[in-house]
Amino acid sequence: MHSSIATALLTVASSVLAQDFSNDGNYGSPFPDTTYPGFESTNPYAIAGSLSNQTSPPKYPSPWGEGLGEWASAYSKARAFVSQLTLEEKVNLTTGTGWELDRCVGQTGSIPRLAFRALCLQDSPVGVRDTDFNSVFPAGVNVAATWDRGVAYARGQAMGYEHKGKGVDVQLGPVAGPLGRTPEGGRNWEGFSPDPVLTGVMFAETIKGTQSAGVMTSAKHYIAYEQEHFRLVPDSVNYGFNITASDSANFDDVTMHELYLWPFADGVKAGCTSVMCSYNQVNNSQACQNSYTLNYLLKGELGFQGYVMSDWLGTNSGVASVLAGLDMTMPGDSNAYDSGDSYFGANLTVAVLNGTVPAWRLDDMAMRIMAGFYFVETNITRDPINFSSWTRDTFSYEHYFVGEGWTQVNNHVNVRSDHANLIRSIGARSTVLLKNVNNTLPLTGNEPLTAVFGDDAGPNSNGPNGCPDRGCDDGTLGMAWGSGSAELPYLVTPDTAIQNTVLAAGGAYESVLSNGALDKMGSLARRANVSIVFANADSGEWFVQVDRNLGDRNNLTLWQGADEAIAMVAGSCSNTILVVHSVGPVLLEKYASNPNITAILWAGVPGQESGNSIADVLYGHVNPGAKLPFTIGANRTDYGTDVLYTPNGDVPQIDFREGVFIDYRAFDSHNSTPTYEFGFGLSYTTFNYSNLQITKLDAGDYVPFTGYTSEAPTYGNFSTDPAAHLFPANFSRVPLYQYPWLNSTNLTEASSDPQYAAPGSFPVNAQNGSAQRIPKAGGAPGGNPMLYDVLYRVQATITNTGSVAGEEVPQLYISRGGPHDPIRELRGFERLSLQPNGSTTFSVDVTRRDVSSWDPVEQDWVVRNTTKRVWVGRSSRKMELEGVLA
Ligand SMILES: *[C@@H]1O[C@H](CO)[C@@H](O)[C@H](O)[C@H]1NC(C)=O
Ligand SMILES: *[C@@H]1O[C@H](CO)[C@@H](O)[C@H](O)[C@H]1NC(C)=O
Ligand SMILES: *[C@@H]1O[C@H](CO)[C@@H](O)[C@H](O)[C@H]1NC(C)=O
Ligand SMILES: *[C@@H]1O[C@H](CO)[C@@H](O)[C@H](O)[C@H]1NC(C)=O
Ligand SMILES: *[C@@H]1O[C@H](CO)[C@@H](O)[C@H](O)[C@H]1NC(C)=O
Ligand SMILES: *[C@@H]1O[C@H](CO)[C@@H](O)[C@H](O)[C@H]1NC(C)=O
Ligand SMILES: *[C@@H]1O[C@H](CO)[C@@H](O)[C@H](O)[C@H]1NC(C)=O
Ligand SMILES: *[C@@H]1O[C@H](CO)[C@@H](O)[C@H](O)[C@H]1NC(C)=O
Ligand SMILES: *[C@@H]1O[C@H](CO)[C@@H](O)[C@H](O)[C@H]1NC(C)=O
């Protein structure tokens, strides 16, 4: 009944079943703890607040949306719409119909009475997943490497148009969790950078860009989803790990605010329409039913007006999740795909009828979803969904998993437009030049013999989409693996693009694309005028394992036998250029100091135009201006944080004892010298920094927010008689599908929930719809608006002192000056374009938030009475100008 794609998906899943990783021991990390000895934060809050088995405080009721800030008009439209809805229609908006039971990776119920078709939720953060004639964009980590707000916006918008063109309502992205606590983390590349400010800016610009195309975003994964190992129990058991609940990220309120929550505040301020809660637990409470992170932080303090959706199978309960702030469950099934039952659906209808979920709470769920809809769209009449995620065939089943409804499911709509140019340009503008001895680069194109080496320069022998979900490392790394991938329309390899360039210039070109062919590499390298060797390191989501990497990387070294290939080529040719495609940091120390390696480029995960992008940089059509969005350390242990690879209990406990000291904050506080520091990147020209100016602006004093919400509003009414909520007569059901109607007038029977939850068994205030005090740090989307007041303007003059046009990213760092604060923290940056001898002003508005610290007792941000230094530098280690904010 199922076509080959579903079979392929099932095969991937069952190949996992066959493997036992449980006895591998702690092969990944040299220490059992995820914070290495000596890397603990000195902040007593961080230590006291990162204990195994600690709990998360209850915070109820779940705040109702009120149309704050820019949301007023979306709320008034949503109010008009939701007021017309029946109980079942509201429930339909909140519940996915089930895995592979409709066309999109997630699809809600519909409201046929009002001609409101189902909402289509679709991966991924690099392009429309599981379809054809879409583009594949550079990964988030590349966007971060551009340090260019315009790039983030333009890419978001282009991806938004592609989703729109397929009939998608919600693009499942962008990513700010994982943030990148550990460089090995499998999905870091889907997001941006371990720096919260760089991530926050790119996250917000992507959200604005995507939503400008009339597509909702799902800002994910909320929160502290920093590793793949042990995120879900069934996956863990499949790999042979005996755990009973998802891992718990244990950390304190200061680290939460100053690091992990920071970019989500930017996302909420930018108007993200939904937030996806993550698989992990936070302080031993599931992220999708954690009242502290959802009710108190996200909807309370950050004033989030949109809706919270679960990650796929990330819902762990019905009533408890709803009261803790979950608004939509995806893909609808509870516990297992196609289980045929749901925590929401009929269960939610029952829970409202039996009074455990107050009517105002369901109304708030429906309101938040429809307000998100109206925030980006004007008309409930939309083009139909014109593709099916489950097959590329033109005809197949509408309800794929159960083989019902044969019809045309794919219209093969080409949504690529001219996005290839943007993709090629972002690929080049995100390539970081790390080493360039004596102007080795750019190449002139007049080299008599150019030689290219490495598996990473060539194609996947099974085609660009040869491995489902890109779950292999075969050929060049254009994209990493997991649900954050998409089908490539083509993949321009470095081999093809460099050959085209060399041949056009009349040169000779040879390549050896197998790292196993070391002898052939050596003999070619000895003859070549320039040798370009490609290497990579991959990672992804842990439903696929590649070479025994369960999503997270087991090491920080190169893959595909690239180290041996590099040794051979560099040992044979004194003009060797190394190009690295990788998901994050890789250890390059020995290459940085090798005299035969004359240039090193980091090209990230660049998408479909990979080869053209790197050729543009190698031959100087694009002058590199990118900077590292993470630290490349000399040793794995220098990072001080690592993945937990072996469970340390039935419920793995990951204690974030380093607090905010991840990536460069850890390197700085340990005074350890990285190979290439955060923010580092060279150019084909040179830049001078001068004339620091600091202007204090009169923003006035901070006033903690005071005030109350309205009482919880309700919209429309419904019959409390269960008989009014039965399935309509003669209704033809799709098997395994989630519906909002009841099977029986006996509510207990209709719910068939074995765990009877008595009315008194709910947390205090969970059902309280009276006016609530708004947190001091709250009051508007993104938090208290006064946090964004500009306190200082810092300016400097940047001059291009070389002979070619180029781009530079000056960076502003501050020290907050407290005894437990990082030595420096990024607070501003701008990508500037400068002609030779050209000068321009770099200007950063330093906000109150930028100089504030989170006070866990006050539960508010405070500006401490400390000396606050400020630097403008070309990287996190190369400070050119220094001053004091006074
Ligand atoms: C955490 O709880 C588990 C299960 O109750 C227990 O085995 C373990 O010793 C506890 N760990 C700590 C550090 O208290
Ligand atoms: C709920 O959605 C399903 C699937 O789209 C649809 O068949 C059903 O009619 C909807 N129910 C209501 C009450 O609108
Ligand atoms: C898994 O752990 C539980 C509780 O620690 C234990 O009862 C069970 O026997 C274990 N199962 C396997 C397959 O080891
Ligand atoms: C309601 O949820 C419970 C699990 O909490 C499940 O056992 C039951 O089958 C669900 N009922 C429906 C109608 O989906
Ligand atoms: C919504 O779209 C439909 C179909 O294109 C059109 O007939 C209708 O006028 C539109 N309504 C509004 C309010 O724009
Ligand atoms: C760079 O060029 C200078 C001047 O030509 C030369 O002295 C030096 O050896 C060169 N360095 C390397 C590493 O090739
Ligand atoms: C690191 O992992 C990759 C991928 O599994 C593997 O190819 C490589 O050999 C490993 N490196 C070392 C030094 O073991
Ligand atoms: C550099 O390359 C030359 C060949 O051009 C080789 O003889 C020499 O051993 C290489 N040096 C290193 C350090 O590999
Ligand atoms: C109400 O319904 C929900 C959902 O089916 C169920 O979990 C809960 O136990 C019920 N509570 C009461 C008091 O009937």
Image (spheres, rainbow, N blue to C red):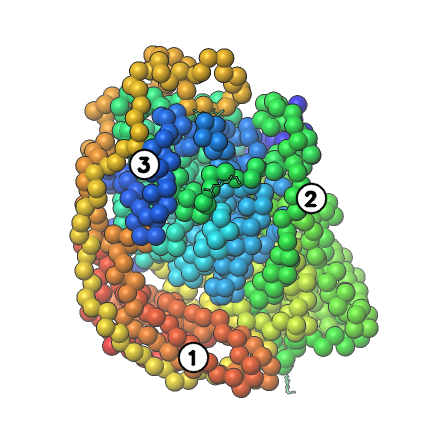
Disc on the earlier residue, 2 or 1:
2
Against 668, residue 190 (above or below) is above
* Mark in front: 2 vs 3: 3
Name the residue carrying label 1.
Answer: 841
Is label 2 in a helix, a strand or a loop? loop
Pinpoint residue 164: horizontal percent, then vertical percent: 55, 46
Q: Amino acid at mark 1?
A: Thr
Q: Which residue is mark 3?
A: 364
Residue depicted at x 34% and y 52%: 70
Task: Identify which residue is drawn at 23% across, 73% down.
Answer: 698
Given this view, does label 2 or label 1 mark the residue nearer the observer? 1
Q: Nearer the viewer, residue 84 or 812?
A: 84
Of circles 3 and 1, which is in front? Answer: 3
In this rendering, position of residue 702 left or right of residue 440: left
Where does residue 662 sit, x and y in percent of width and height?
39, 59
Residue type of the residue flagged with mark 3 = Asp
Quadrant of the rendered image containing residue 791: bottom left
Which residue is at a point 18% across and 36% down the rendered structure image? 770
Quadrant of the image containing the C terminus: bottom left
Q: Is residue 39 at all visible to an observer of this figure? A: no
Label of residue 466 in the image: 2
Disc 3 to disc 1, C-alpha distance: 47 Å
Circle 3 packing at 10 Å, graded few (<14), some (14-19), many (20+), is many
Residues at marks 2 and 3, CA–CA distance in whole angstroms:
44 Å
Q: Is residue 615 visible?
A: yes
Q: CA distance from mark 2 to mark 1?
A: 48 Å
Q: Would you say the beta carbon of the disc 2 residue lies within 8 angstroms of ligand 7?
A: no
Amino acid type of the residue that numbered disc 2 sits on in the rendered structure: Gly
